Image (spheres, rainbow, N blue to C red):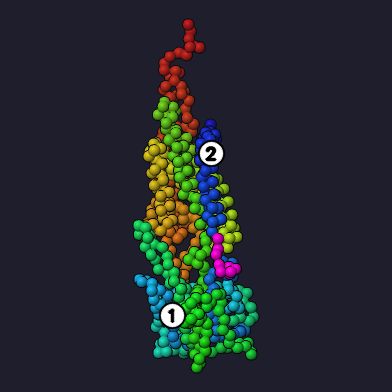
Amino acid sequence: MSSTNALRHAVHREWTGFRRPGRIVAMAAAMAAVIVLGLFYAFGNHASCDGPCPSDPHGPDGSLVNDQFSLMHQDLGENGSITVRMTSMKGTITYPPPHHDKLVPGLVPWAKAGIIVKDGVRPGSSYAALMVTGCHGVRMQYDYRHDIAGSAGNGDGVSARTPRWLRLTRSGDTVTGHESADGRRWAKVGTARLPGLPETVQVGLFATSPGDLTLVGTGLGGATEQVRWTQAGGAFDHVGLKGTVTGAGWRSDTVGEANRTDWEKYFQASGAVEKNGTVTVTGAGDIGPAGTEDGARPVERTLGGLGLALISVLVVAVRLATTAYRREATGGAPVTRGELAAKTIVVAGVTFVTGLLAVGIVVPVGAAVLKGNGIPVLGVSALTGARVVVGTAAALALSAVLALALGALVRRAWLAVPVAVLAVVVPYVVTSFPLLADGAAQWLLRVTPAAGFAVQQSLVEHPQVIAHYAPSTGYFPLPWWAGVGVLGAYAALLLGLALRRLPQGGTSPAVPGRGTGRGREDSGQVPRSQDPR
């Protein structure tokens, strides 16, 4: 029999032996844990608003975005420009640490004030903006995800003595940004192409300011997030326009919600004011990609039952290996490399299918339930969605192979199961909560097999968005392919060591009495049926 046929027969035999009631129940329990706990999370989350909840804006690419700012604007044709001199940028931060009892002047790092070209004032519409930021210098940003750095001058350094000149030029669907320190020598910051930009767009001055994020210690060094409302404003003069629509005048608007806080109602309203040739625009909010810091949920948040499923899968895989060694210890046929290889194929295949069904059900259904309950869900592309589902199933399968190999090396289920759980489940679970310090959690997810579950992350880090980018908020330290590589390396190493310890042998257990040295035919006695007497 060829080696291929022998392996096929061995796999068939192992698959037949795998289908014991206990193992089938354990795999079904793993699937149920993922589906039931995921749907329990989805059905248990509901949006709560004063009146009807506002719709969540989506950008030109269909993704969730933040689009909230104050704007002084007018119509601009297909070709034209806006030039301004910015002479001041100031802000207010509400109740910052350490005592959280004062309103203090100041700018958060991504406070923004500058000029913008935008397809109307609908939240989520296409735009290109050139701005001065609180701590990141001059930037050109467009369509929520794109960010180009300019000079290093920050908002608190802008004054009448050290102004910052900004210019945006539109030519069809292309917008180009320039900056200058004196209004004479200009430096190009960047160019943005905005496909489908209509003939008439809005051009003007804007200001906005995202929340002030600080971390509060908890657990064994972990951290939770606190976000406080902030406001920023910019003062502009020498406003020059070219290509504006004849007869159109300036209009003051807010994109998104505004003037709902007590500070805005009683002290400083968000909006635009013109006085003695100077326009002051004050606003709160942000323009950029939305994330979990804004209350949106990633699709992988529905995988809360994965930890329990992992435990069940690891136990099944370990016991599948150690059962064979108990047979050998009681006088049965020894475990061979072919048999262990067949067990590996079976346990990996069964676990992969189990994970594929469970994750393939809970992710789309859970996301639909969350959306139906008014919870915004961060959109993913079809390719990313497939990677989350298929990759998580593959990570489960690799974990099962690791546990099987560990069981084959240790040969004691009571020892192999805790080791497998400590190596895979514990790092995965403890880093998903704000228990450990961010550095320790990131270290665990770099060097342990749990790194492989980075494949489930759909969240994207955006440099222009302030957020707590840590494992406890869903951000793995390694890219998904590197994490899978770490898990795969552990599984391959342990399996290689386990196979190396075994005799070459065949792919099927020998039958006692045939070549084992223990049967009657090998004992030197003549079988009774052939006794000449």
Q: Which of marks 1 and 2 is nearer the N terminus?
A: 2
Picture residue at 35% right of the left edge, 71% below the top: 98
Residue 11 in view of the camera: no
Picture residue at 46% right of the left edge, 55% below the top: 454
Residue lying at the far bottom of the rendered structure? 276
Picture coordinates of residue 513 (x, y %)? Answer: 46, 21
Residue 351 vs residue 14, the one in the foreground: 351
> Which range is magenta?
46-55
Residue 263 vs residue 96, the one in the foreground: 263
Callout 1 amino acid: Gly
Residue 327: quarter of image: top left
Element under label 1?
A: strand
Residue 390 vs residue 11, the one in the foreground: 390
Element under label 2?
A: helix
Q: Counting other residues with Cα less than 10 Å from the Cα at mark 1, is it few (<14), some (14-19), or many (20 or more)?
A: many
Q: Residue 24 carries which label?
A: 2
Which residue corresponds to mark 1? 91
